[in-house]
Image (cartoon, grey):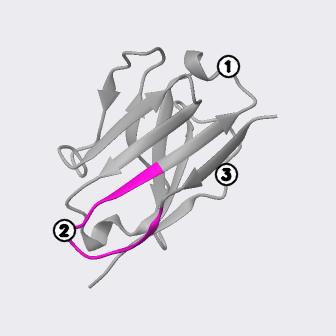
């Protein structure tokens, strides 16, 4: 059974940085594309970063986070990361990892709150 365990969220001031981690189990991690998604209060869940399978995965970001967020993966540790820099209040959300495209199963996510 697949499991996604996200961690690393917290309260950060505007302009600050956070690094999220997601441990994946129950799948052959290296063959899956992976993604980070977020859901802000009252909004639909959206994709914020994706990385293709393999060790040299290509990445993609929407314009809203491009140049500020970086996704990476460690296929030995079965972990995917999201480095978030220059955070602003619009980045406040619960962040989830999943495969890309996503499975019909989600972890609990990790809350990121950007506030002064």
Which badge, 1 or 3, is on the more N-terminal residue? 1
Q: Residues within 10 Å of mark 1 (few under 14, many from 20)?
A: few
**Contact (CB < 8 A) between labels 1 and 2?**
no
Which badge, 3 or 2, is on the more N-terminal residue? 2
Q: Is residue 112 above or below residue 49?
A: below
Query: Residue tagged by mark 2?
Result: 15
Q: Splitting the image into 4 quarters, where does residue 1 fall? A: top right
Secondary structure of residue under mark 2: loop
Which badge, 1 or 2, is on the more N-terminal residue? 2
Query: Residue tagged by mark 3?
Result: 107
Q: Splitting the image into 4 quarters, where does residue 59 fall? A: top left
Query: Residue tagged by mark 1?
Result: 28
Residue drawn where x is 66% and y is 58% of the image: 108
Foreground of the two, 23 or 69: 23
Q: Looking at the picture, how far across and down is residue 67, in whole percent? A: 17, 44
Residue lying farthest to the right in this orientation? 1
Q: Splitting the image into 4 quarters, where does residue 51 fall? A: top left
Of badges 1 and 3, the one in the foreground is 1
Residue drawn where x is 59% and y is 30% of the image: 78
């Amino acid at each position: 059974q697949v499991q996604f365990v996200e961690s690393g969220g917290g309260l950060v001031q505007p302009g600050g940085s956070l690094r999220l981690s997601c441990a994946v189990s129950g799948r052959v991690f290296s063959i899956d594309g992976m993604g980070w998604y977020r859901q802000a209060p009252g909004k639909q869940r959206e994709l914020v970063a994706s990385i293709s399978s393999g060790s040299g995965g290509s990445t993609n970001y929407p314009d809203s986070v491009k140049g500020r967020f970086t996704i990476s993966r460690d296929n030995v540790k079965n972990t995917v990361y999201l480095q978030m820099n220059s955070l602003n209040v619009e980045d406040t959300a619960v962040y989830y990892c999943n495969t890309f495209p996503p499975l019909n199963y989600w972890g609990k996510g990790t809350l990121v709150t950007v506030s002064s």
